[in-house]
Image (cartoon, coloured by chain):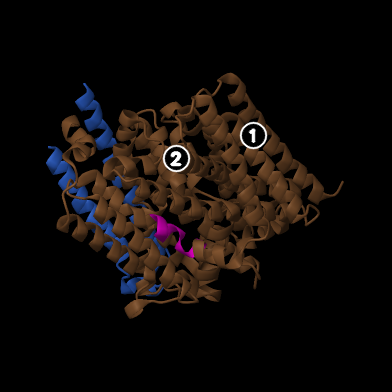
Chain colours: A blue, B brown
Amino acid sequence: MKFNRTFIELIIFVILLLAAAIPFEFTERPEPYVFGWLPFPLFYWWILVILNLLFLYWVSSSWLREINEKKR
Amino acid sequence: MNEGILSFLVILAYLFILMGVALYCYKSEKIKNVESFFLANRGVSSVLLPLTMIAAMQSTFAFLGAPGMYYTHGIGFIVIVLSQAWVALMVIHFGHRIWQLGKKYGYLTIGDFFKDRYDSNFLKVFASAVSILMTVVFLAMQYVGSARAISGVSGEQISYLFALVVIAVFSLIYVITGGAKSVVLTDAIQAIILLSGIVIAAYIAIVPVGGISALFSKIAETAPELLSRPGPKGLYNDKNWVMQFILLPFGIWLCPHVWVRSLMAKDEKAISTSAMAVPISQIVIFATSGLFIGLSGHLLLQNLEVPDNVVPVLMNQYTNWFVASLVMAASIAAGMSTINSMILVCSQMFTQDIIIPFMRRKLREEENLLISRIVTLVIVVLGTLIAYKPPALLVSVVIDVAYTGLAQMAPAFILGLYWKRCNRTGATFGMVAGIVILFLTRIYRINPLGYPGFLWAFLVNLVLTVGLSLMTEKPSIEKVEKIIGYFEGAR
């Protein structure tokens, strides 16, 4: 169970890290504008920021739950 | 009375309110030992720890530097949020381990860990000396930012020197009276103020532009290069972009005033919530508010000479003096909270790692506390003097290498927590070589093969730490078992 969680955590971490750290070519121009005004690179980075937040929430809450279960 | 002086009085009132909180802490519970003075008795709750974490991490840079970066370089500056999010994972994994060791063996500083794990007084003193050097210079820069903000909001009617003395005196009172408990409580208040302040500042900046969609549409027409990488000046080119993800998160977490928060935690819940505080505050400050302010500033304030002034100038031009002074009070809150944490941790490292271990006799708690308070005073005076007349070379070199310099402790620290084979020889040569290479490449401005010196420093550090550990004698089983065995036993 713990191995599975750690492994999944590691895989998601690597994917999110690479998605942010690789300087993709499409981030070198503002077009297309999402909703007609939001530059696509920012749209992409904002999505990543939210995904990072959700991932970190999942990691910290499952880590805390595991610690509490051990204590019980 | 003119608006400049009234604005200064609003900020002064704010500083006095915080002083009341510090004095309340001083009177409510007497500080009996250094653990109480420096770590609030390792009892900071899951409500206060995330707030003090935010306050310690976010400095005047959040209010002044970040909008200035968006103003100049465009949306690529969001890389700071994408790369620093991972500090939260370090808080959970490494922070939890050091918290457990701290509780078990009474660690007060990172030097205590190095001494215990590697049986080396040299590593303890060296790591602390490097951390103190970086932190004192950063402390001085926080003084500079806060004093300039006060002087600026008063319309230069309050001189820079007077503003600097005001900030230094208040910060000294906050720290010296209530120690960590006072710092944590004032931090909590200041974190709420700074988060509210930056959101209000963003709102004030966006309204005259016509809203968020109008902001981006207008920027697309006038300066589209701000809306993609690498930005107008090419700062976020491919190489620089990738570099942000390599060492920066380690350097941020190993800032003494940040990682020491893990030692203050009351329980795991506090560690978990403090970890989440990192990405949440980054989103509020850097991914949204700072971005809107910087881009609005680009539309509303053409050719600003000092981009870092985008917030004060926008506030002065687009709102009344009272709201402007409240927003600037929030900016000063960001600076003051970081200042308090830096003073406390510098005093902590200086007394516990450099002075006390070399005393001829074991000190009583009251003597240790007295020395800690005297050192606190010395740190404040030193920071103020540097802020008054910053030595150009020292400041520019240290600012450039600060985070990457602190990251040089990562191999010895992290491998020491997880790898039994890591020994004193590897850790010592790795860390010293890393710091020396880092400083030399920065001072002589050398980038071997086109890659920055800090990357080579870290690489050499890592190779030496691992290689020499494997080539030389194994560390004593007793020491290793004390640290790593403790975690294995806890599983």
Q: Residue at x 64, y 34 (%)?
A: B18
Residue B155 placement (x, y as % from top left): 78, 56
Q: Disc 1 or 2, which lies upstream in sequence?
A: 1
Residue type beneath disc 1: Leu
Q: Residues within 10 Å of mark 2 (few under 14, many from 20)?
A: few
- Residue B171 located within the stretch drawn in magenta: no
Residue B460 placement (x, y as % from top left): 28, 65
Instruction: Compare residues B82 and B425 and report the one nearer the observer.
Output: B425
The circle on residue B340 is none
Main SS type for the magenta part?
Answer: helix
What range is drawn magenta here? Answer: B399-406
Q: Residue at x 54, y 35 (%)?
A: B372
Residue type beneath disc 2: Phe
Q: Residue at x 41, y 72 (%)?
A: B441
Q: Is residue B145 above or below residue B187?
A: below
Q: Which residue is mark 2?
A: B358
**Quadrant of residue B45 in the image?**
top left
- Is B115 left or right of B65, judged from the image as shown? left
Q: Which residue is mark 1?
A: B18
Circle 2 — which element?
helix
- Is B478 left or right of B449, judged from the image as shown? left
Tell me, yes or no, if residue B442 can be seen here: yes
**Quadrant of residue B99 in the image?**
top left
> Mark 1 falls within which chain?
B
**Quadrant of residue B137 in the image?**
bottom right
Residue B187 placement (x, y as % from top left): 54, 37
